[in-house]
Image (spheres, rainbow, N blue to C red):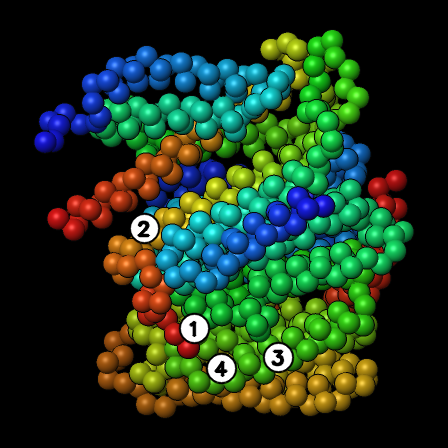
């Protein structure tokens, strides 16, 4: 199954090639878009293969697992690979025109490809330390990308992000070190196997806390959310779209799911902690979002709130809730990146991010206006769109599991979400056009293409629940539901 | 009193002339012996960079920038990285053909692709680290110039 | 066992420095301390009394060796730590250029 190796080789190779060929104008765009298109195709092929093969294993260098590193792809990994590479491809198309405003475009592409390699690596890795290394590759390039504009705000946000991210990484590393000292192995399936043989130990609780703090910081759960609004709103828009849409989900939520559900095993305590922090994120993120005037800052707070929904769904822990949570994860990746790209398009045309100063842009920027309307409707849960279904599933699952109070909070927060997205739409796109903006133009073709494709996926997302796509989603949720059954699946596939 | 010529005093320059070659050779030695004894591309690469940094400290930046500037450094780092990626993916994609474990022990020419990859890593690390050093130093100098 | 606790105290010193200090440079140093505390812990995890390095050598038989895997991990972590430090330091230089100070309480153009 050497196909898995290409997920890291291709973006790394592209990053190095872009560095070498930086003098030729336009070649970095071409290389980056082509390789991300290739990766997207590869991820679709992988998703197809996991359907027929089940778990796929690649032994790096031919070493036998538990001695060597393994790459593992199962339903969950394939699901996230598709989401990541889809968003990355469209963001890179968008960036062809958008990043023209910055000098040294090749640096953006090189860093972006490093980040993509890191993200793909986190997903396919079947080894704890390898996961940490890829997580750091993704994080470090994200720190640099946030500071890309080198304006004072960018630097401040990037510094905050760097410090918080580095502390989180060190927590994760300490957790891995303790886990290694306890089980003498790093292979995730093997760690799960060793832990099931051993009696309960207070050390495990400490490891839990470390991982929860580390990945919680990376996923910006509420007590740890301080860096996210700064970092995501200061970065260039394609980077914000990538950070909010994919990065916090991959290095935060995915790693959390994989390690807690598949390796350490879940307990009632953990589920209630996840549920409580999910609800807290939802409420705090939503109420802070209402107060914002800056478009991108509001979107960033909204990300905290929506991530709360996903974590809450994981905490409920019933099959339906996890299905809904994963579906919401995919939807959020699509519509939040669309919204950030729209915010970027508004900034591109008008040079303004403050909602109070904008208005009536719908006539001037029709494509941006309508795509953003689709995304806003989807994220706030208007019926035929994808966001409605995922939220509905989460709330129904919460009610079924008996958490009626939490379900009511989730419904109320959904209404609050609708409020602040209506505010966004009416302040920016409806109403009277300011005379200052009479001469603005619609964004270039490349940006329009990305926006329209994302909007179409946003509208059609509800189809994921039906017919051919449903096994794809269920394959992902089954991996989480099987819990520590992951070890049998992986060790079985090795032999 | 300020020195007219850039760099440090005559004593430092003389000693640097003697030692810089030794440091460079030692770095290359560590790199080439990486698959036989402790060491390897990363350690060797850092020692090679240290030789350049020593030159820069002793003789001032213009002397070194003439030999290796950021452009050239980036080019070398890119070449090293691509070489390493090619070697690594060749080994990883066909693991049966290449053995990591040497058949002949304690010899310079053993372990197949492993020694080649050490050279690539050393190139990447040496050039990359030196570019980082240059960038940070030049960043500070720019800032000082702006203040004046 | 006491060694592990000393290691943990070192970790806490670093964490204190990151959380409580106002100077950017001291925060970066704190990060370094935390990182090296974890590295030290990893080395201690793999250490065995009177063990020697697991390197194949001529005419010698190795009976009691330390675990090489944590050492390989530490090498990787050092490289990662180098990258993080470089990013943080270059950001600090740029921040000083723009704001003229290293005090984080005075660097507040973003709020909310």
Badge 3: residue crowd in 10 Å (few <14, some 14–19, many ≥20): many
Q: Are marks 3 and 1 on the same chain?
A: yes
Secondary structure beneath label 4: helix
Mark closest to the chain's N terminus, 4 or 3 = 3
Which residue in the structure is indicated by mark 1? Answer: A296
Q: Position of residue B107 (x, y in %)?
A: 64, 9
The quadrant of the picture occupied by the N terminus of chain A is top right
Mark closest to the chain's N terminus, 4 or 1 = 4
- Which dot marks residue A280? 3
The quadrant of the picture occupied by the C terminus of chain A is top right
Mark nearest the camera among 4 and 1 is 4
Which residue in the structure is indicated by mark 2? Answer: C93
Q: Position of residue A303 (x, y in %)?
A: 54, 73
Residue at 71%, 57% in the rendered image? A207
Q: Marks 2 and 3, how far apart in space?
A: 37 Å
Dot 4 falls on which chain?
Answer: A
Mark closest to the chain's N terminus, 3 or 1 = 3
In this view of the protein, which residue sits in the foreground, A183 or B27? A183
Q: Is residue A264 visible?
A: yes
Residue B137 lies left or right of residue A219; in this view the side is left
Residue A324 lies left or right of residue B148; in this view the side is right
Q: Marks 1 and 2, how far apart in space?
A: 27 Å
CB of mark 1 within 8 Å of CB of mark 2? no
In this view of the protein, which residue sits in the foreground, A452 or A432? A432
Q: Position of residue A179 (x, y in %)?
A: 74, 50
Q: Are marks 1 and 2 on the same chain?
A: no
CB of mark 3 within 8 Å of CB of mark 1? no
In this view of the protein, which residue sits in the foreground, B42 or A391? B42
């Amino acid at each position: 199954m050497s196909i898995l190796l290409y997920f890291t080789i291709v973006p790394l190779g592209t990053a190095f090639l872009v560095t070498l060929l930086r003098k030729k104008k336009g070649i970095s765009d071409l290389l980056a878009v082509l390789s991300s298109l290739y990766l997207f195709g590869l991820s679709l092929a992988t998703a197809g293969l996991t359907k027929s093969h089940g778990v796929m294993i690649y032994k790096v260098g031919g070493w036998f697992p538990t001695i060597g590193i393994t790459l593992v792809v199962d339903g969950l990994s394939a699901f996230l690979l598709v989401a990541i590479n889809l968003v990355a491809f469209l963001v890179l198309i968008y960036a062809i025109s958008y990043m023209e405003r910055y000098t040294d475009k090749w640096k953006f592409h090189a860093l972006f490809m490093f980040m993509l390699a890191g993200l793909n690596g986190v997903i396919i890795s079947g080894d704890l330390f390898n996961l940490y290394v890829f997580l750091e590759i993704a994080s470090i390039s994200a720190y640099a990308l946030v500071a890309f504009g080198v304006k004072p705000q960018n630097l401040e946000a990037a510094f905050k992000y760097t410090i918080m991210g580095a502390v989180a990484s060190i927590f994760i590393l300490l957790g891995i070190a303790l886990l290694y000292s306890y089980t003498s192995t790093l292979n995730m399936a093997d760690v799960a196997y060793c832990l099931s043989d051993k009696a309960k130990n207070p050390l495990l609780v400490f490891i839990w806390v470390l991982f929860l703090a580390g990945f919680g910081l990376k996923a910006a759960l509420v007590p740890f959310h301080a860096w996210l609004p700064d970092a995501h709103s200061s970065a260039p828009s394609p980077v914000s779209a990538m950070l909010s849409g994919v990065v916090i989900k991959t290095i935060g939520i995915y790693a959390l799911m994989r390690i807690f559900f598949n390796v350490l095993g879940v307990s009632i305590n953990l589920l209630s902690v996840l549920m409580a922090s999910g609800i807290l994120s939802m409420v705090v993120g939503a109420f802070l979002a209402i107060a914002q005037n800056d478009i991108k800052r509001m979107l960033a707070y909204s990300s905290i709130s929506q991530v709360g929904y996903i974590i809450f769904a994981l905490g409920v822990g019933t099959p339906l809730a996890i299905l809904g949570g994963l579906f919401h994860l995919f939807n959020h990746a699509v519509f939040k990146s669309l919204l950030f790209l729209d915010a970027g398009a508004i900034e591109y045309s008008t040079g303004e991010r403050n909602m109070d100063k904008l208005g009536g842009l719908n006539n001037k920027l029709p494509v941006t206006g309508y795509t953003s309307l689709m995304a806003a409707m989807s994220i706030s849960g208007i019926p035929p769109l994808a966001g409605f279904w995922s939220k509905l599933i989460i709330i129904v699952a919460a009610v079924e599991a008996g958490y009626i109070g939490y379900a009511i909070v989730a419904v109320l927060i959904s209404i609050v979400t609708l409020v602040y997205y209506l505010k966004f739409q009416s302040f920016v796109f409806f109403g009277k056009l300011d005379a200052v903006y009479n001469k603005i133009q619609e964004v270039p073709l490349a940006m329009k293409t990305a926006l329209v494709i994302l909007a179409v996926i946003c509208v059609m997302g509800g189809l994921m629940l039906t017919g051919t796509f449903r096994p794809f989603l269920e394959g992902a949720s089954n991996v989480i539901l099987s819990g520590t059954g992951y070890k049998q699946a992986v060790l079985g596939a090795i032999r | 009193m300020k020195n007219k010529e850039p760099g440090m005093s005559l004593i430092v320059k003389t000693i640097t002339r003697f030692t810089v070659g030794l440091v460079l050779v030692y770095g290359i030695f560590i790199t080439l012996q990486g698959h036989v004894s402790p060491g390897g591309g990363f350690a060797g690469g850092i020692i090679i960079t240290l030789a350049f940094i020593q030159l820069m400290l002793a003789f001032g930046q213009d002397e070194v920038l003439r030999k290796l500037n950021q452009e050239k450094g980036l080019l070398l780092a890119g070449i090293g990285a691509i070489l390493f990626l090619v070697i690594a993916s060749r080994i990883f994609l066909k693991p049966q053909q290449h053995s990591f474990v040497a058949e002949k022990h304690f010899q310079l020419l053993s372990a197949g692709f492993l020694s080649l990859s050490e050279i690539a890593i050393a190139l990447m690390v040496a050039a990359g680290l030196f570019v980082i050093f240059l960038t940070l130093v030049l960043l500070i100098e720019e800032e000082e110039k702006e203040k004046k | 066992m006491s060694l592990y606790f000393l290691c943990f105290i070192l970790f806490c010193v670093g964490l204190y420095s990151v959380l409580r200090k106002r100077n950017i440079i001291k925060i970066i140093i704190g990060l370094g301390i935390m990182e090296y505390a974890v590295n030290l812990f990893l080395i201690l995890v793999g250490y065995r009394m009177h063990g020697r390095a697991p390197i194949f050598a001529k005419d010698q038989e190795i009976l009691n060796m330390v675990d090489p895997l944590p050492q390989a991990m530490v090498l990787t972590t050092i490289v990662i730590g180098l990258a993080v430090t470089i990013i943080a330091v270059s950001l600090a230089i740029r921040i000083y250029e723009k704001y003229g100070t290293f005090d984080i309480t005075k660097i507040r153009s973003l709020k909310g």
